[in-house]
Image (cartoon, rainbow, N blue to C red):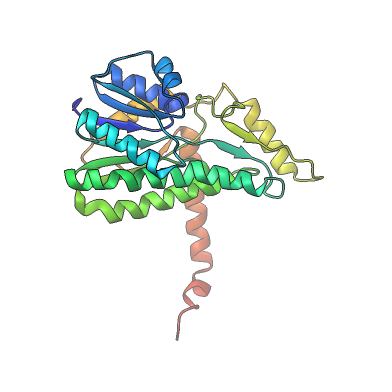
Amino acid sequence: MNTSKVWYVTGASQGLGLILVKKLLKNGYRVAATSRDAHTLSQAVGLIDKDRFLPLAVDLNNLDCIDESIQQTLATFGQIDVVVNNAGYGMAGTVEEISEQDIKNIFNVNVFATIDVVKSVLPVMRSQRSGYIINIGSVAGFVGAPGWSVYSATKAAIAAFSEVIALDVKEFGIKVTVAEPSGFRTGFLTKESLALISSKIEGYEAVKNTQDHYLSANGQQPGDPDLAAEIFIELAESPEPPMHLFLGNDAYIRASKKLTDMSAELEQWKSMTIGADFK
């Protein structure tokens, strides 16, 4: 295990990000971690070791602020080897009832912030001719559930972005993985991490039933965030990490079913698909 590597982790003051940072520090890695409040982050981590831990107050919706945090990390540690784009939150509700501003806000955090962090760190990794980027997506970005349309759209965007950026940067020795978990016991379904817009429109029963199902599962999700953090550390040591990594048995089942269904549908409509070309 190469503990000389430097990790840069966003959204690190709670949930999976916090667990990952603590585990990295426990294993001897050097870590730059971002949150909106560096003091709160330091208290949450509980370790003040300036040689290995750099807490950063970063507004992820401000590219200049992101650039500055990257430069602070380089000034402190001299390199950046692994980036984990973990910052983000959930949103449930019907698209009719989610305001335009709320939609823009979640895209700003879940999508544009991730793109901006990658944009800011790529010159560093290109110069090093090495690096590893883990973008935290969701199985919802591949197999959505009723009522999660906007959130799923953000995570589908992260998956597509990750796939193509991996092709773009492969020649520089930079690797990319999009991690796509199902339900993990991280506080994702709490009011601090989930924007819940209750439907007041008659009908939308599938949406309402699914919301009730997910909310009742809070604190009982099968996914273990400690194991997820260990998996990320293992991935960073792998010479050929996966492009997509679904995490959790539920994610595996849902993704497998969709792949089977998509394959069958593709073949069913093959003649129409290829019939769209010039004859």
- Counting from the top left corner in percent of width and height, residue 223 is at 47, 27
- Can residue 216 be seen here? The reply is yes
**Is residue 129 shown to the viewer in this render?**
no
Q: Nearer the viewer, residue 230 or 27?
A: 27
Which of the 4 image quadrants contains residue 209?
Answer: top right
Left or right placement of residue 235 versus residue 225 in this view: left
* Residue found at the very far bottom of the displayed protein: 279
* Residue at the extreme right: 202
Quadrant containing the C terminus is: bottom left
Towards the viewer: 44 or 269 = 44
From the viewer's side, name the closer residue of 182 and 58. 58
Give the quarter of the figure containing the N terminus.
top left
Image spot of residue 277 (x, y percent)? 46, 79
The residue lying at 24 percent from left, 52 percent from top is: 170
* Relative image position of residue 146 (x, y in whole percent): 64, 44
The reply, left or right, for residue 106 in relation to residue 237 is right
